[in-house]
Image: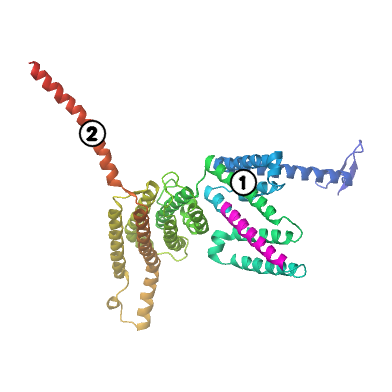
Amino acid sequence: MAHQEKETSGLEWRITLGDGSSKSLVPETGPVSRIWMWLKGLMAGLVLKVWKFLNKAWDIGVEDPRKVIHCLKAGMALTVVSLVYFTRPLYEGVGGNAMWAVMTVVVVFENTVGATISKSLNRVIGTTLAGFLAFGVHWVASLSGQKFEPLIIGASVFLLASAATFSRFIPSVKARFDYGALIFILTFSLVAVSGYRVDKLFALAHQRISTIIIGTCLCILVTMLICPIWAGQELHALTCRNMDKLAGSLEGCVEEYFDNNGELEDSDKHPDKKLLGYKCVLNSKTTEESMANFARLEPAHGRFNFKHPWQQYLKIGSSMRSCAYSIEALNSCIDSENQAPEFIKKRMSNVCLKVSSNSSCVIKELAKTIKTLKKSSSIDFLVEEMSSAVQDLQNEIKSLSSLLSPAELLLPESKETEKTTSTIHLLEVLPVVILASLLIDISSRIQDIVKTVEELANVAEFKEEADDKAKQNQANINRIVPSQQNDDQQTMKALERA
């Protein structure tokens, strides 16, 4: 029977149970203690979140140091442009509108050179066009008298702002001039409305345009001269990485499908990140389009001239995405509930792996072609090997018909029984046939990628890989021939002396 005991100290209560065990009773804490504990927990959670945020920011900076450099460049550009505001002669020279130069640097400075140039052009053109239109509207409105002047200005703001806003819904305008249209609306509205109360409207527009030109020129110079990041190079590298990921996903999916028995070791298996590399290709369309638009505005840099066919990279990306969709369907076969029997998989594994391996080799060779900007001397051979493997796969699919139960070997039963037996066998073969059909479809899509890469090589005038080897061999010969001539001359002199 349970009973209670009070300790001699009077600070603790215990309950002694019938089995001889005891349990202490902790007194309830007061409201002040509960509030203090809540504040301690809140502060600890806040400190933990800040620590995690700092660790994440550190990892981002370590992974791509160029982001840190971009931040330093932006800070330096703002510091330099602030001199226009701090220096009295410069400040008075722009009529007290120096803050527009600072605002321009804030909104125009971007990560890549092409993006900065694009925003700078949009801001300058949008501001200039809106300023002149606002000045013209103000001149016409001033001639109409004080009664109709506000009506004309209000109507012009309504019409032009509405038209410019609608133009932002047009895809071609939105892709290249969306920021310019926004600046046009802002500048026209400010200048047109403020012109109703400001006498020296032309001087005001001139000063704002001047400060904006100062800010945009500074941004372009900083992005081009200090650790530049070129949109063209980023697009070029992105295309090469996507090709490598596409090849890895294709080869890994097929190997994973035929490894249901676990015959491959863990070191030979492809990680899930590599198997799903095709998703990066599917999600890169918007990035490729923006980079291509920015790269067109960049000057010649590195291995790329001013007229490099950046739009051709979009065609290559479109062909890769078409192939990636088929690889996505191929990847769904791995986790499908309907699987072919193991003896059918073993029969089809070698030829399917051969097709995937040859197809991956073609994609990797295309990636090498783009990366080195040199035409491949072995791409035709690799495409022929892939086509030959596809032909073998088609023949192997036709041979699967021998696995189905032929009608003449069946016992004399009803037609319904005969149909049921054949259908069961067909359903067992169907999963591996679907996989093989997808591989055949992928190989045809890879040939489309080959065509687009060859178009890029022809338009961009890639060098022949054989020509470089010939030049290298000729240089080696030129180094060897003089030494041989010296030996011959020394031999002739020795004979004359004799």
Please check the rendered image and state whether residue 185 is part of the magenta-colored stretch, yes or no: no
The span picked out in magenta is 120-143
Distance from Cα at disc 2 to Cα at disc 1: 54 Å
> What residue sits 27% from the left and 42% below the top?
469
**Disc 1 target residue:** 214
Q: Is residue 25 visible?
A: no
> In the rendering, at what x and y percent does residue 355 appear?
33, 58
Residue 319 in the image: above or below residue 266: below
Secondary structure of the residue carrying tag 1 is helix
Numbered badge on residue 478: 2
Residue at far top of view: 498
Residue 495 in the image: above or below residue 443: above
Secondary structure of the residue carrying tag 2 is helix
Nearer to us: label 2 or label 1: 1
> In the rendering, at what x and y percent does residue 316 appear?
42, 58
> On the picture, is 330 further left or further right than 38?
left
Residue at far left of view: 498
